[in-house]
Amino acid sequence: MRVFVTGATGFIGSAVVRELLAADHEVVGLARSDRSAAALEAAGAGVHRGALDDPGSLSAGAAAADGVVHLAFIHDFSRFEESVRVDGRAIAVLGAALEGTGKPFVVSSGTPAAPGRAATERDRATPGTPAAGRDANARAALDLAARGVRPSVVRLPRSVHGEGDQAFVPTLIRLAREKGVSGYVGDGSTRWPAVHVRDAARLYRLALEEAPAGSVLHAIGDEGVPIREIATLIGRRLGLPAGPLPPEEFGFLGALLGVDQSASAALTRDLLGWRPVEPGLVEDLDQGHYFA
C-alpha cells in the first residue's frame, strides 16, 4: 500500500520507513526541509513537502495514501503543552482526510504509569500529568473508528533504543560525563520500560497492516529496567561511580526518573503475534555504540 508517514526522518520514523519499504509498501514521507527530503530519497521513499503545522500539506498527503502512520511530534519539553496541541490538530486533520475510507491510521503515544504494577494496553494516563495530553490525542484518533477510519495507537516506552538514539539514555550519559557521576534518583529502584527501535518499527507495520479499529498497542521489549542498573552500566562504561543525585540535577528528566513506570505488551502480543527479537536495553547499552 501507499503509506504517508509523518516524522519519517526521525530516529523511530526512519526505522519505520525502512521496515515498510522492506515489506514492499510504497512510502511517502512528510519533509519540511531539503535535508529531510534528501534523506527520504536516499532511503528509497517518496517526498511530500509540508509541515506538522501546515494543515493543507497534511490533508493532501493523507488523502493520496492508502494508510497513514503519524510519528511526528515536537519534542520541546519547555513548551510541551503547545507540542501536544499541535499534535492534536495534526491528528484531527489527518483523520478528517481519511473519513469514510476504512483506511488505517496509526498514531503514536506513550505508555502510562500504573502504580504498583505493569501498565497494560487498557490503562489510561493519569489526569493532570504530562502524558494525559498525548493520551487524549490518541483517544481522539481512536474515536475516528465511528467515522469510517481504522485507527490504532502504538504506545512507546520511555526508552526506544538503538544506534542513532538521541533521547533520554544519551542525556543520562551526557549528564554523567558533565557531573563526574552516573546518577539516579532516590535508591534507583524506579523502572523504565524499553524497546529496540527495530522491534518498534515492526509493530508499527503490523498495526498498519492488521490492527483492528480501535486497537491500543504497547511496543514493549523490557517491561521495566531499574534506573540504578542503567546508571551502573553507564558508570562502568565511562569509568565513573554511580550514585544518587537530587532530581533537579537532571533537569526535566528528574521527574521522570523518580516515577516507576513498568509496562506490559501481553495483549499486543496476543492480538498481533508481535514478539521483540532485538537486544534489550541493557544488552544494547553494553554493546558500546552509545559511548562512541
Image (tube, rainbow, N blue to C red):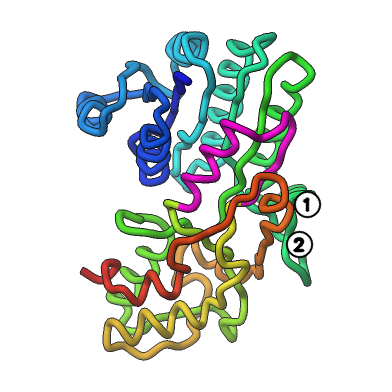
Numbered label attached to residue 232:
none
Numbered label attached to residue 123:
1
Which residue is painted at 46% across and 77% down in the image? 230
Amino acid tagged 1 = Asp
Circle 1/circle 2 CB separation < 8 Å: yes
- Mark earlier in primary sequence (1, 2): 2
Range of residues picked out in magenta? 199-218
Answer with left or right where residue 286 lies relative to residue 71: left
The spot of residue 117 in percent (x, y) is 76, 69
Closest to the observer, 70 or 252: 70
Label 2 Cα crowd, 10 Å radius (few <14 / some 14-19 / many 20+): some
Answer with left or right where residue 200 lies relative to residue 30: right
Amino acid tagged 2 = Ala
Q: Residue furthest bottom?
A: 241
CA gap between label 1 and label 2 equals 7 Å
Closest to the observer, 188 or 288: 288
Residue 75 within the magenta-colored segment of the rendering? no
Which residue is painted at 20% across and 69% down in the image? 292
Q: In terms of secondary structure, where does tag 1 sit? A: loop
Residue 213 within the magenta-colored segment of the rendering? yes
Q: Is residue 291 above or below residue 218?
A: below
- Residue underneath mark 2: 114
Which residue is painted at 39% across and 22% down in the image? 26
Look at the magenta stretch and give its main secondary structure. Answer: helix
Q: Is residue 208 above or below residue 268?
A: above
Q: Is residue 168 above or below residue 282?
A: above
The spot of residue 88 in percent (x, y) is 61, 28
Q: In terms of secondary structure, where does tag 2 sit? A: loop
Closest to the observer, 127 or 105: 105
